[in-house]
């Protein structure tokens, strides 16, 4: 009787552990994670990226719709090819990187969740904060859960990976980045591409 | 002096155009960093790494042309050598 009880307890504890949501850390040791951005401009579009990305996402493979998390981008890590444009972009005239050192997206709710195999697509509503202005935003995301793949990416580590991809557009005027100004030189719309992977070591 | 300024202006234009063309004839702004795409085989993500490289653009070309124009303009203000001075 005691043995049966012990086995039952072990099974229930194991099930609970396996079904528990996992927390994925998005600080990438391989420096692949990036947030790309594109703004139209007369001579050539301004294409840049940021790789100062960190944050955590709680993901349950059994219930992807319950995913929650917060991803932060260090403003100073934004890079564009032209040094003068970068200097202007980070200055107090545009993003004011010293006063507003982070750009943050914090998810609140997943809608239209569809899961096929290890891949989940959804529309995520969350709060996007840029230059100290927070706005609610709904963005499409694609989550790919890679079970036991952490070791393939980071030697001597066991665990899972969660890949997040998202493309969405914001308006700089919504976030007090020179609203209504210089639109003949730099478009109001900013196309953002997020390509990040998080690790959940075991 | 007149002749020297004009020769420098021509050499500046020719040299800048040749350098700009050899560096890829970039019709955009001058770049000091160039993105390089890196594929992560495990996640399938495409990362971007920035290489420090100087790629002259139309602003670089324009600055050289303005510089050459100024040199050529100054050459017209320089008085010509008098025959007495030449002797």
Image (tube, coloured by chain):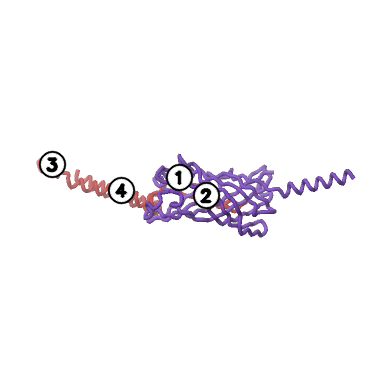
* Residue B52, numbered label: 1
Residue A137 left/right relative to B19:
right
| Left or right placement of residue B7 versus residue A71 in this view | left
Q: CA distance from mark 3 to mark 2?
A: 76 Å
Name the residue that disc number 3 marks: B86
Please report the residue visible at 61 percent of the width from the left and 57 percent of the height from the top. Answer: A111
Chain ID for purple? A
Q: Is residue A200 left or right of residue A131?
A: right
State the separation of the CA atoms marked 1 and 2: 31 Å
Q: Earlier in the sequence, mark 1 or mark 3?
A: 1
Q: Residue A23: give x, y in percent of width and height.
A: 65, 45
Q: Residue at left 68%, top 52%?
A: A61
Q: Which quadrant of the view contains residue A43?
A: bottom left
Answer yes or no: are tags 1 and 2 on the same subunit: no
Give a yes or no on whether discs 4 and 3 share a subunit: yes
Element type at marker 3?
helix
Q: Colour of chain B?
A: red
SS class of the residue under badge 4?
helix
Residue drawn where x is 18% and y is 47% of the image: B76
């Amino acid at each position: 009787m005691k043995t049966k009880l012990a086995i039952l307890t072990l099974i229930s504890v194991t099930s609970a552990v396996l079904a528990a949501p996992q927390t994925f850390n998005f600080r990438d040791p391989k420096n692949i994670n990036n947030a790309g951005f594109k703004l139209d401009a007369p001579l050539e579009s301004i294409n840049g990226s940021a790789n100062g990305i960190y944050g955590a996402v709680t993901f349950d493979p059994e219930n992807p719709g319950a995913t929650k998390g917060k991803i932060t981008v260090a403003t100073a890590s934004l890079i564009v090819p032209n040094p003068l444009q970068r200097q202007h972009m980070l200055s107090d005239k545009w993003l004011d990187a010293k006063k507003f050192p982070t750009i943050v997206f914090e998810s609140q709710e997943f809608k239209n969740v569809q899961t096929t195999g290890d891949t989940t697509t959804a529309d995520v509503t969350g709060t996007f904060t840029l230059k100290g202005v927070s706005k609610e935003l709904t963005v499409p995301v694609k989550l790919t859960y890679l079970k036991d793949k952490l070791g393939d990416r980071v030697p001597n580590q066991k665990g899972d990976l969660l890949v997040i991809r998202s493309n969405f557009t914001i308006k700089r005027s919504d976030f007090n980045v020179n609203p209504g100004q210089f639109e003949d030189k730099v478009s109001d719309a900013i196309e953002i591409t997020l390509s990040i992977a998080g690790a959940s070591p075991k | 002096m007149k002749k020297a300024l004009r020769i420098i202006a021509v050499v500046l234009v020719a040299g800048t155009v040749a350098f700009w063309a050899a560096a890829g004839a970039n019709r955009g702004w001058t770049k000091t960093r160039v993105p390089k795409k890196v594929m992560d085989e495990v996640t399938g993500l495409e990362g971007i790494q920035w290489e420090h490289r100087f790629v002259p653009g139309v602003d670089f070309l324009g600055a050289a042309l303005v510089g050459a124009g100024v040199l050529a303009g100054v050459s017209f203000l320089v008085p010509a050598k008098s025959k007495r001075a030449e002797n």
